[in-house]
Amino acid sequence: MDLSNLEGTMCKPPRLERLFIDGPVGRLEAILELPAAQLPLGSVVVCHPHPQHGGTMHNKVSHTLARTFVKLGYAALRFNFRGTQNSEGEYDDGVGELDDALAAITWMRARNYGTKLWIAGFSFGAAVAIDAAVDNVVDGVVSVAPSITRLASGLLVQLECPWLIVQGDQDKLIDIEKTIEWVNSLLPGPELLIISNAEHFFHGKLVELREAVIGFVA
């Protein structure tokens, strides 16, 4: 990807549309963001953290992931899992939420935004994103502080696409040693980037997170 015009693109606010998409058990509330001054090069679906612990599509890490992809020229879809805010249905312990993510992928594919489709997520949403990538051929995965104990696909899964894991070294919710052990069990394994002095929600570290995603995706 040519990054020569990226700085100028970053200064322009994205086109934003609030909408609902069809989910397996009802409508899913969503936000679609598009690059301001160009046709999308591709698209990304972003999955938010645990809905029973306050996670929504408005979470700042999820928002940072979506905006970073938009700055790179992608269309970004954030959505609320079932039972979250204005999305219909009820929480389903990650099983139904995986179906929601697959429905969001199907919706984005039908839009034909460029040739590539990525999936990204944070915490609970990162685990859902990884599971969704197992079931679907995607062009890349960005998983931030993935809750690996929630992986329905098991701990020894290897994705056949570029895959970035970002973890803070001060994360008190996700054990970094277990994440490292899990990554080392995968061959060839994802790229693991550890951000120094970052806790689970990346307070004060969102710029570093954004730069890490830009460097990997670009």
Image (spheres, rainbow, N blue to C red):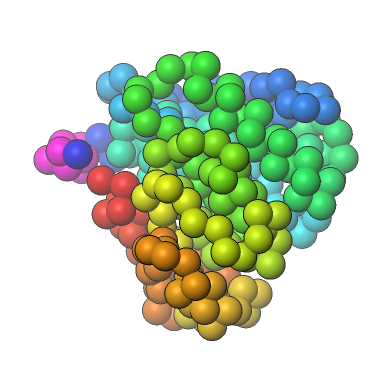
Is residue 119 at least partly visible in the picture?
A: yes
Question: In this orientation, which residue lies closer to the viewer: 29 or 151?
Answer: 151
Magenta span includes 3: yes
Q: Could you say where residue 59 lies in the image, as x and y percent from the top left? A: 60, 51
Q: Could you say where residue 24 lies in the image, as x and y percent from the top left? A: 77, 27
Q: Could you say where residue 163 lies in the image, as x and y percent from the top left? A: 41, 54
Tell which residue pokes out farthest to the right in this image: 90
129 lies left or right of 12? right
Quadrant in the picture for residue 71: top left
Is residue 60 at least partly visible in the picture?
A: no
Residue at x-position 33% and y-position 59%: 212
Quadrant in the picture for residue 188: bottom left
145 lies left or right of 28? left
Question: In this orientation, which residue lies closer to the viewer: 187 or 131?
Answer: 187
Is the residue 124 above or below the residue 155 in the image? Answer: above
Residue at x-position 37% and y-position 50%: 162
Magenta span includes 92: no
Question: In this orientation, which residue lies closer to the viewer: 209 or 90?
Answer: 90
Q: Which residues are magenta?
A: 2-8
Q: How many marks?
A: 0
45 lies left or right of 58? left
Question: In this orientation, which residue lies closer to the viewer: 140 or 60?
Answer: 140
Residue at x-position 48% and y-position 16%: 111
Residue at x-position 55% and y-position 36%: 136
Is the residue 14 above or below the residue 119 in the image? Answer: above
- Quadrant containing the N terminus in the rendered view: top left
191 lies left or right of 100? left
Is the residue 206 above or below the residue 84 in the image? Answer: below
Q: Could you say where residue 69 lies in the image, as x and y percent from the top left? A: 38, 40
